Amino acid sequence: MGYKVALVGATGNVGREMLNILDERKFPADEVVALASRRSVGTEVSYGDKTLKVKALENHDFSDVDICLMSAGGAVSKEWSPRIGAAGAVVIDNSSTWRMDPDVPLIVPEVNADAVAGFTRKNIIANPNCSTAQLVVALKPLHDKAAIKRVVVSTYQSVSGAGKEGMDELFAQTKSVYTASELVNKKFPKRIAFNVIPEIDVFMEDGYTKEEWKMMAETKKILDPKIRLTATCVRVPVFIGHSEAVSIEFEKPITPDEARSILRNAPGCLVIDKHEPGGYVTPYESAGEDATYISRIREDATVENGLSMWVVSDNLRKGAALNAVQIAECLINRKLISAKQKAA
């Protein structure tokens, strides 16, 4: 018997991508229900060769739902995830609301799948921040080999990380530049077209932004609390795909060739690292792909046991939708949940 899956936030970028991935991966669902706010009721979304009509979250009965993929933002998740979990469905939440809750596992299946068993405390599992997800996929196998002490990461994050409004703003501003018309900033604090913005999320008291803090805190929770990490997160005029320049200091020696070999055999990683023009992956090439791509692996001679590398991934997929579906698959494959008996 298959599972009943509810998807909250079905009309958003990530929600639509979740539907695509459920179909692509042939997820064992007998029924998928698309949910959103009342203003989206009746909107049609694609699920494989089917068309689903969006229903209202507020009116939905979750008593026969097995898995709820939550992609509707922090405020909605804070209100609804505990209710849905109490009704017996396992909530896999894409917002930041539950990530640092000690009773909620924060999961990247390639990195810490064993921790998924902790979902029973609240029936909620958290998906990490998009920039954290791809980073820890690349760090985990290297940490297992040589023990990471410190990470310095600079991100180059696409506008799709800010939702449809971010993508629309880049498109509109680019068009305005070419037509010499007025540029309007709504989603971003400064113009994003032909520019970069070193500000993602709100500023905190120590001068870091919340996005940078998320990378620090989430990496510790997912991978190892002893790892020290500093991040600078930058929004760039790219539609899809986050890139990261990563420098790592290890406890033990590790050469670039060793790192390449380890990463080539690591789950979720794909090494494209030719020391020639174009011998690396860019965000454009990562769009629509599942892998975390790793390029430019080289020695960092400024520290003992140091490596630097370039990490790229589709933020809508591994950074959000794909990771959530992989968590659901993990629950099923480990026999941690079973499908509820549905009324005839």
Image: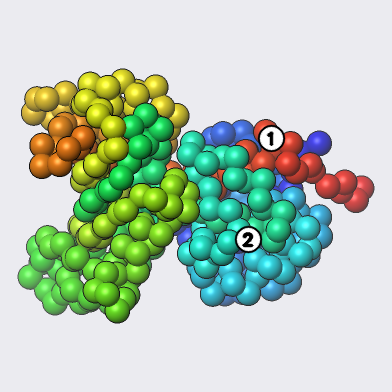
The N terminus sits in image quarter: top right
Q: Is residue 248 visible?
A: yes
Image height of 163 relative to 317, above or below: below
Secondary structure at numbered mark 1? loop
Using the numbered discs, state the Cα–Cα distance from disc 1 to disc 2 in whole angstroms: 20 Å
Secondary structure at numbered mark 2? loop
Mark 1, mark 2: which one is toward the viewer? Answer: 2
Please identify the quarter of the rendering in which residue 25 is found: top right
Q: In this view, does 158 lie to the left or right of 278?
A: right
Q: Can residue 272 be seen in this view?
A: no
Residue 223 coordinates in the image, percent (x, y):
44, 46
- Look at 34% across and 27% down and name the residue there: 263
- Look at 57% across and 40% down and name the residue there: 113
Q: In the depicted view, which residue is nearer to us: 22 or 322?
A: 322
- Look at 69% across and 61% down and name the residue there: 122
Residue type pointed to by label 2: Asp
Q: How many marks?
A: 2
Residue 22 coordinates in the image, percent (x, y):
58, 41
Q: In this view, does 144 lie to the left or right of 90?
A: left
Residue found at the very far right of the displayed protein: 344
Residue type pointed to by label 1: Arg
Please identify the quarter of the rendering in which residue 217 is found: bottom left
Q: In the depicted view, which residue is nearer to us: 148 or 89?
A: 148
Query: Local crowd at mark 1 within 10 Å, few (<14), some, or many (≥20)?
Result: few
Q: In the depicted view, which residue is nearer to us: 70 or 330?
A: 330
Which residue in the protein does label 2 denote? Answer: 103
Q: Residue 170 carries which label?
A: none
Q: In this view, does 331 lie to the left or right of 310?
A: right
Which residue in the protein does label 1 denote? Answer: 334
